[in-house]
Structure formats: C-alpha cells, structure tokens
Image (cartoon, grey):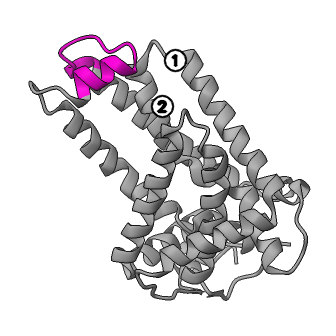
Amino acid sequence: MPSESALEQSRRCQLAPISYEQPFLWLARGWHDLLAAPVPGLLHGLAVTSFGLLLLLLAYRQFWLLAGAFSGFLLIGPLAATGLYAVSRALEAQHKPTLLTALAAWKPRDHRLVLFGLLLAAAGTCWVLTSASMITAFAPEAVSDPVDFLHVVVLSEQSWLFEGWLALGGVLVAPVYASSVVAIPLMLERRISVLGAVLTSWRAVLQSPGPMALWGALLMAITLVGMSTLLLGLIIAVPWLSYASWHAYRDLVPQADLPQVA
C-alpha cells in the first residue's frame, strides 16, 4: 500500500452515479440517525453553536472580520462531523452508539485526518484574510457591525462589492467542497492516503455534477437557516447534516478494495 500511488488507491474505490432524489433521501436517513442517536449528535451541535456564539461575542464589533470567519468556519465543517460519521457507521452495523463512539474516531491512529484538518484550516484562514482585506479595502464606509455590513456591503447601490465577495467565496468553496464531500468518511473507514481520498471525492462529484451541486446547495441552505436563528438552529442542523453526509458517502462509494481501518 505505501508504494501505491494516490490515483491507484482512488481507482480501487468503486463509485456509483446518483440521482437528484438521493440528496433528499440522505437527509431523511440523517434525520432517522439523529432520532436514533440524539445525545452524541446534539452535543456536537451544541459545541459548534457555542463556538459560533463565542466568535460572535468576541468579534461582533469587527464584522468585516466576522463575516469571513463565519463563512470560513463552514469550510472545516466536514472535519467537525468526523465523530458523527462513526456514530452513523455504528447504527448501520446495528450497534448502539454513545458519545464515546464519536470521541473514539479522534484517536490518533495516524495523521491523515490531522493533515486534512490542517489543510481545511489553511483554506479557511486564507478565506478569512481575503474576505477581511476585500471588505476593508473596497467598502465605501467602515464596517463595524452586522447593520453596517448589511447597509454598506449587501445593500450598497454604489458598488458590486457584495457580489464580488460572494463570487470569490464561491471560487474557494467549490473546490473545498469537491475535495471533502467523501474524503473524511472514506479515510475514517479505509486505509487511503489524503490525496487518494481527495481524488476519490473529486471523482464522485464529477461523475454526478448536478445531484452533487444540489447536495451542496442543500447543505448550505440548511446551515444558513441554522445560523439565521442566532446560531441555535445549528444544534440540530450540525448532527442532521453530519449523519446525512455519512449516507451520502455510502451511496457515492458503495465499495472500496482497500483495507479497513481497525
């Protein structure tokens, strides 16, 4: 395995095309898992929400930075779901998962998840700095709080700053999404390199671009709804989408001729 290239590893993963109906089935299965294992899921959601509220509290008066920080946090969302992938896998095997099931996924068996997490964190940091620089450089007035951001950036009739900000964010988010949509659950279950997992993720997206774009839009929409409720909706949205993402992985990569992680 060590001498096998990432591309060869990726080719050992069987991929299945998906339909436009399947993303909605993943949400239904994810909701079923949330009802079956609410404690680890809701605790993960509470942890993410608490972090978001702390971020909001610390940076409320620096919204030029906060806007990028929140959107950048979405980039590392798949990593935060690692423990909940293990919960869904346990439910799939007819086991009764607990919070320890989720925490066990973080045992340092190897450094692949750590490396991938660092890469996602680097992408998130890059976006935070880019976003902050863009807003401070091109906003016609100072942006200090959410009201300023709404009036000066979002509703401005003098510039295309908000459109440019969204477009630039999309340019960054799209490849991160394509790189991570099945990479983390694949590494959790199979012995495959980080690059091999990323290549497999890209293959899955490119094989079914329409349905995968729909899945990305659903992930974003539900997350934004959760954030719009003073972040409290994330307590439910985070575990729901995490469990659903495991089922997405299962359908996208139904079989892999690779050793299982012990």
Q: Do the residues labelled 2 and 1 touch (CB within 8 Å)?
A: yes
**Front-most of 167 and 26?**
26
The C terminus lies in which quarter of the figure?
A: bottom right
- Per the image, label 2 sits on a secondary structure element best described as helix
Q: How crowded is mark 2: few (under 14 residues within 10 Å), some or many (20 or more)?
A: many
Left or right of 157 in this view: 44: right
- Per the image, label 1 sits on a secondary structure element best described as helix
Q: Give residue 130's mark.
A: none
Among the 4 quarters of the image, the one containing residue 183 = bottom right
At x 22%, y 19%, the residue is 139
At x 75%, y 54%, the residue is 41
Residue type for callout 2: Ala
Left or right of 207 in this view: 150: left
At x 45%, y 87%, the residue is 17
Residue 171 drawn above or below residue 90: above
x then y, percent, for residue 148: 31, 17
Q: Earlier in the sequence, mark 2 or mark 1?
A: 1
Q: What stretch is highlighted in magenta?
A: 136-153
Left or right of 240 in this view: 128: left
Residue 43 drawn above or below residue 95: above
x then y, percent, for residue 127: 40, 37
Residue to which mark 1 is pinned? 59
Does the magenta portion include 147? yes
Does the magenta portion include 82? no
x then y, percent, for residue 169: 33, 43
